[in-house]
Amino acid sequence: MKNLSYFFALALFIGASSFAITPPEIISNADAIRNPSQNFHLKVAVTSTDTDDQSIFDVSIQGNTRTLIRTLSPARDKGRNMLMLEEDMWSYLPTLKRAVRVSLSQKLTGQAANGDISRMRWAEDYEATLTQETPKEWVLHLKGKKKGLTYDQLDVWVEKDSFRPLKANYLSVTGQTLKEASYLDYKLMAGKQRPTKIVIQDAIKKSASSILTILEMESRDFPQSLFTQGNLSRSE
Amino acid sequence: MNRLAFTLFILLSAFYRSANAYEFSKIQWTPDFELGHQLVYGAKENKLSKNLGYTVLSLKTDFPTESATDLINTRISLRGALDTQGPDEISIRAFNLNYGNNWLTVTAGFQEIAWGETFGVYISDLVNSKDLRDPFLNDLSWIRIPTASLLAQINLDNWTLQAIVTPFPKNNQFPDEINHLKIVEPPALRRDNVFEQAEWGAKLGRLFSTGLDVNFFALYHWNRNPVFAPQLVGTTIGLMPIVQQTKSTGLSFTQAWDKVVLRGDFVYHLQTPLQPDFTQRHRIGNFFQAILGSDLTLEENLILGAQYHGDYDDASNRHWLGLRVSKPLLRQKLTPELFVFQGINNSDTWIQPKIRWNTSANLSLDFEYSWIPNFRRTAQPGYFGTFENYHRVFSWLKYKF
């Protein structure tokens, strides 16, 4: 009888282990909630406390390494498009009719960095570790696997039932919180309930914030030639 | 060009604009419209040299394709300008057909092709000739002269190969006079057959996993640098632009590390016309140009840039240093910028403070002051020898919708 108890206990342990989800899986699932897999198109509006104008961007994303951002609004900035390849980024200047190299962490508008829109998957860029767990949520620490990412480290809160990302703190290389992001207004988009409003707030100057509102999102394929510097002029 | 044509152009623009971006039989039309005004006041001679109103109409048409990974579009862009101080003009800025798939892009027709990575002086931007009538207007979208070209680009992984043919090249456009010497209309770039007169070239680029982006290029073209020979015009001496076929080869690169971007352009021109100063007789020689610069982006998009520029030919070397600072202020409504271009072993100094005012989502206004002081005289002339102690004010109003 004692042996049988050991057997059941072992089986329970093995069973529980096989169902325990790993931190990288949690982050992959949270990514799948944020965006459709692989190739997709979205239209996003950014309003900021430190600018008067609302910016609207048309974003084409192929995998995790190719992104084309077209500026639709304000009209005076039309044509100021951006291309991301791997961790490298170019901004097209209509006054030069030429693409100019910029850094991924450079400000796009308000509190939103270029990478906040162009690079929207964590799993491939960051090593995840579980730092805290409550009955309702996981808290994960993400550390960049490579250089040149928008943020060196992140702390991410993920809802257990749904894998919805709830909030994230964007950290500097020394671990100082730079910005705090909240993922809000879950709505049906591209076949799933996804966050349609992301509020990014400066961690020190709390009054400075940007709201990213996803206006449209759909899975879509693109020609690879769309994601070239030469094509930035043809995307004007 | 008469004003009736300009009026028709405005009406056509308004018609296209009213069409707005819409889908018709799955063809997507995307019109863009810009109205603007440029004013140049030469403070030294106390004279308005440009008072120009213009409109630009652009229409991009995307055609449906059977495969999602193919794209076909056309682009038409026209610019009409009225200048109280100069000629009125209508020019074609773009008129081309573009096809792209996963690995190939082909663009045929009137277009601008941009090469190079650096600011201020565009030594690698050789594919299109330039409108040099306003020597201090540095906006490439305004001064590049579009030409009918065939551009094919192959993209394979991180490699890019670009091939360009321009069968009917165009001359640079020059001002009517320099230092009170009349500029003679340059000879047409014509040869007995199209193969002899054509410009052609290629650019091979590679983006390395370290982030280093390198491009090698070679171009057979008509010389782009302004070189003149004295010529009798009636009873006075004028200047005749020298146009000659030449070969240029070079390298452009960029590398970004977080907040720092390093850029470089290096070009070697073989057996090209050279003239360090318009008062000197031109000669033919080899000519090497190098620009190496870096930008640092700090908090709140404060950008600091520094650039070294060197020209080396068979007889002399000239060096310059360029500095640029800009920062958006007042909720990003105002962006002041300062550009200083200083000759190291020549007499050039060019100081250019500038301010951009984003008055609304559609309207922006640039104010720019250019000053070429004669702080010091050196034996060697710089680029601005003929403009010593010159200053001017430039304003540019743009309304886009």
Image (tube, coloured by chain):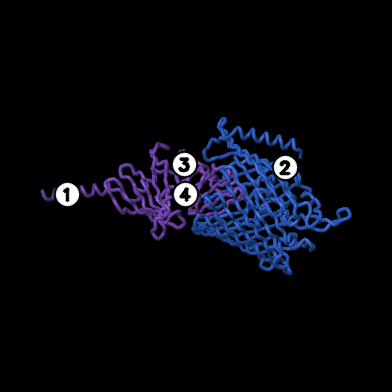
Q: Disc 3 residue type? A: Phe
Q: Which numbered circle lies on residue A40?
A: 3
Residue depicted at x 66% and y 50%: B395
Left or right of B192 in this view: A124: left
Q: Reading the chain from its start, which is encountered first: label 4 or label 3?
A: 3
Q: Residues within 10 Å of mark 4 (few under 14, many from 20)?
A: many
**Looking at the image, do the residues carrying marks 4 and 3 touch, with CB atoms under 8 Å apart?**
no
Query: Mark 4 and mark 1, same subunit?
Result: yes
Could you tell me how far apart the alpha carbons at marks 2 and 1 are, in whole angstroms? 92 Å
For chain B, the rendered hue is blue
- In the picture of the structure, the residue carrying the numbered disc 2 is B82
Residue A90 appears in view: yes
Could you tell me how far apart the alpha carbons at marks 4 and 2 are, in whole angstroms? 41 Å
Residue at mark 1: chain:
A
Identify the element where label 2 is drawn.
strand
Q: Reading the chain from its start, which is encountered first: label 1 or label 3?
A: 1
